[in-house]
Amino acid sequence: MLIDGALWLCTAVSAGLTSWLSLGASPPGTSAFPHADKVEHLLAYAVTTSLFMLAAVWRPGRGEGVVWGLRKGVLPAAVTVAIVIEIAQGPIGRERELADAVAGGLGALAAVSGNVALRRRVVASTTPSVS
């Protein structure tokens, strides 16, 4: 389906941009206001994880995706990626910060929680009630 292809493409672009901005030179705007980089981490992981959840796990109109059986591993995987990226920043001259990994994990948590809540809402609205 076209929407699934678009979701996978957007997921790949978002993951690529997140990795590139995390492992390259410090991105612009990281000092725009106090803790701006934490907000950037939170948003980057929330967007990427949301897109992945819609593409691979569950989305309205399609239901279960290709990794439905692995859905409980999405959040731990996203948190692991956030930690590994922070560790990888040391050798390339970027500052390692636990708070950045935490912000990324919180963004992933928001995305997974949002997908679960959306699924529950959609399933509940389409399930006939028994009187």
Image (cartoon, rainbow, N blue to C red):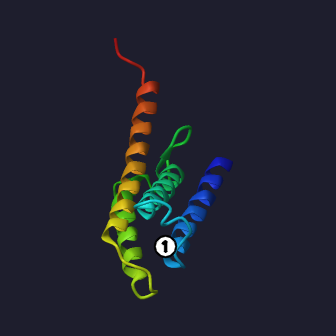
Judge from the rendering whether residue 44 lies leftward or rightward of residue 84; answer left or right: right
For the question of whether residue 3 can be seen, the reply is yes
> Which element carries disc 1, helix, strand or loop?
helix
54, 96: nearer the viewer:
96
The quadrant of the picture occupied by the C terminus is: top left
The amino acid type found where label 1 is placed reads Ser
Depth check: 11 or 20 in front? 20
What residue is at 56 percent from the left and 62 percent from the top? 14
Q: Please report the residue visible at 40 percent of the width from the left and 70 percent of the height from the top.
A: 81
Residue 99 appears left or right of 62: left
- In which image quadrant can residue 130 be found? top left
Give percent across and percent down for residue 86: 38, 75
Q: Residues within 10 Å of mark 1 (few under 14, many from 20)?
A: some
- Percent x, y for residue 106? 35, 55
- Determine the image quadrant of residue 5: bottom right
Q: Quadrant of residue 79?
A: bottom left
Q: Is residue 68 above or below residue 24?
A: above
Front-lying residue, 10 or 28 = 28
- Residue 97 point in image, percent of width and height: 34, 73
Question: Residue at 54% of width from left, 71% of height from top?
Answer: 27
Q: Is residue 1 visible?
A: no
- Kindly identify which residue carries mark 1: 22
Residue extending farthest to the top is: 131
| Nearer-the-camera pick, 10 or 129 | 10
Point out residue 41 in the picture as x, y percentages from the top left corner. Answer: 44, 62
Height in image: 15 above or below 47? below
